[in-house]
Image (cartoon, coloured by chain):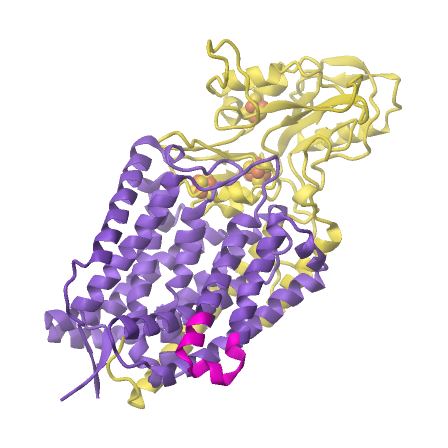
Chain colours: A purple, B yellow
Amino acid sequence: METKQPLGGRVLTGPFVFFLILVLIGAYFAAKRFTLGIGAVSNMNDGYPWGIWIALDVVIGTALACGGYTMALLTYAFNRGEYHPLVRPALLTSLFGYSLAGISVMIDIGRYWQAYNIILPWHSNLHSVMFEVALCIGAYCLVLWIEFAPALLEKMKADRLLKKLNRVLLIFIALGILLPTMHQSSLGTMMLMAGYKLSPLWRTAFLPLLFLLTALIIGFAVVIYESLFSSVTHRLPLETTILSKLATVTFWCVLLFMVIRIEDVNLRGYLPLAFDGSLVSNMFLLENTFLLCGLFLLMYPGNRNCPKLLFLSASCLLIGGSLYRFNTYITGFDPGNGWQYFPSVGELCITFGIVAVEILGYMWCVKRLPIISVPQTS
Amino acid sequence: MKIKRRDFLKLSAGGSLLMATLGPTAALSNTEKKALPPDAVGILYDSTLCVGCQACMVACKQANKMPLETEDVYRRWDNPQDLSSKTLNIIKRYQDGSEATKDQEQDGYAFIKRQCMHCIEPSCVSACPVSALRKDAKNGIVSYNKDACIGCRYCQIACPFNIPKFQWESTTPEIVKCQLCNHLLKEGKYAACCSACPTGASLYGPMEDLLAEAKRRLKLEPGVYANFPLNRIGPDGSNRTTSHKVGQYVQHIYGENEVGGTQNLMLAGVSFSKLGMPELPDEPFVRLADGIQYAIYKGMAYPLALLGALIYMIRKGENNGDHKDKA
Ligand code: SF4
Ligand code: SF4
Ligand code: SF4
């Protein structure tokens, strides 16, 4: 018998203080952005109107937060109850990832006080990919909070409310699978609009499908990572059987991704472009090297039981998948006319601050809320 | 990165393939050029007539109350380097070698005027989530509404001509771009840059007239003298003309077909890529993205079906008692 329990222990540890400092530095630069304008802290410009706040915090951040999505997909849609112990911790990281991506967006957009215009029907532009992404991400944040509510209610011992919630939770779990499927693929569609400004190594009609697959791959990798990590740091028995099954699913996703990815560039005749030695082409090679390494490590079923190799391949997939997304939004994007972009210190500090909030929140939650499955010792 | 027509077709083919797997679509099969709005107006810029006096830039700043842009410490003159949040149009110069002859690619120089192209199928309008950028249904002018804009800057990513600019230094930033002086129309006036142009290089008028005029010019014999209309043509035209030696035109009307056509047409004596204009396919980039979105989200049928299926599967799983406690 297993139950979910708060892990307990001191909250104010060394790492906790470290991340707290990062948060404060980030807050300083965020304050600067709101009082002096985006240009005062960021190196974004009219050629590169999107920088790391979008590419890292939103495009990669929400992919890293896809653990909740992938686990819900396996557990509920494919009816694999065995993954259940992984759902709640995954949901927690998703909740933080998405909520903070939302905050990043509010820092990034210039006219944030008018953000609600998106939901005003006379303003909404149904043709806009951005409209769909914004709406889906907003809705998904809400759904995540509702999906996560049972953990809070259990803590508060609000049994009546919990029962009521459980009755309608079904719809939210379904939405929690539908919404990410929609916006994660649309994050790819989004960059199709850039036209010739996006290098042909990334610009393809398959962008939506490839983005959906990277969301799944990164989501799976994060779950593997997370459970390895928490079992080591909190000295819990490893969920290896579940993990190796998860690794098998991941393997097939990566394989599908790689076949489409390489064949697509090849059929369009742009593979030679990958070897011209430029920064852009090297980033293409780097991205695919990481993904291929992850793929090969998972190829042998034996490897899928070994925590060390699992860790290694999950890392490769995380980095490779994130690079794919980063390259599509930043490296592969060239507006021409000599424009250049490299993030400024202030810009980076805001991003680090946001990541730090995420880690702090996670650390606090697993210690104080019933998240992690602990075998019952009666 | 140049995009060849062939690549674009392949790209579209990939898109169709993807969509064929997702469902039927009408959006992409239609590769014809979209018709101009009924009362479409625009600008014909003729690089061979332009003398680089920048009268249009001055007039544009005045008409739109745009601030000075200068690196001069005494702030004595306007000296923008490119389009920016302070500069809606700019005359740029191409030069090569000894720069001896005007409108010649080698050892020559030429001018180009950059501003919003008022695309027939504008990427910026499709991109904008809150319809802050709109294309007027009658005259086709692409205008901006700051009260709708959320400042997401997707229009900047989407515009193939890098036209929309953002006020990076402001705490209440706006998107800035040429709106074809639509605020002057009410007063019976028209594009300030065209009414200021002394040589007829910037010509305002109804699109049909501008296109006919551009085609007429391409047929003129180079080197002979011909009459060129000044400022504005069409029913409300100025009826003023000026005599010029006909330039050695590149036989291409830039903007006639680029990304589905634009309401800003250009003629030049040196190739447009030398003048810094991107080489673009005839099919607008918006079609592919739009087509995919349309195929997947048409009437929300697929998403709703998927939602239904998910609810069914989850309920079934629940009834089997697989996972009683959710989340
Ligand atoms: S040139 Fe750019 S800003 Fe102007 S209408 Fe076309 S897409 Fe929009
Ligand atoms: S920055 Fe403003 S005008 Fe441009 S796409 Fe975003 S909301 Fe629309
Ligand atoms: S039409 Fe008006 S806003 Fe546009 S470039 Fe000419 S003067 Fe400037």
Where residue A269 sits, quadrant-wise, is bottom right
A89 lies left or right of B108: left
- The number of callouts visible is 0
Q: Is residue B290 above or below residue B37?
A: below
Tell me if I can see residue B132 in this picture: no
Image location (x, y in percent) of residue A226: 34, 70
User: Can you tell me which quadrant of the image ligand 1 is in?
Assistant: top right
Instruction: Give the residues drawn in magenta, as a range.
Output: A297-312
Query: Can residue A162 be found in the magenta stretch?
Result: no
Query: Seen from this angle, which residue lies furthest bottom?
Result: B320
Tell me if I can see residue B199 in this picture: yes
A30 lies left or right of A280: left
From the image, which quarter does the N terminus of chain B lie in? Answer: top right
Q: Is residue A96 above or below residue B272?
A: below
Q: Residue at x 48, y 85 (%)?
A: A302
Image location (x, y in percent) of residue A27: 27, 43
Q: Nearer the viewer, residue B128 or A2?
A: A2
Image location (x, y in percent) of residue B58: 56, 15
Query: Can residue A302 be found in the magenta stretch?
Result: yes
Overall secondary structure of the magenta stretch?
helix
Q: Residue at x 39, y 57 (%)?
A: A61
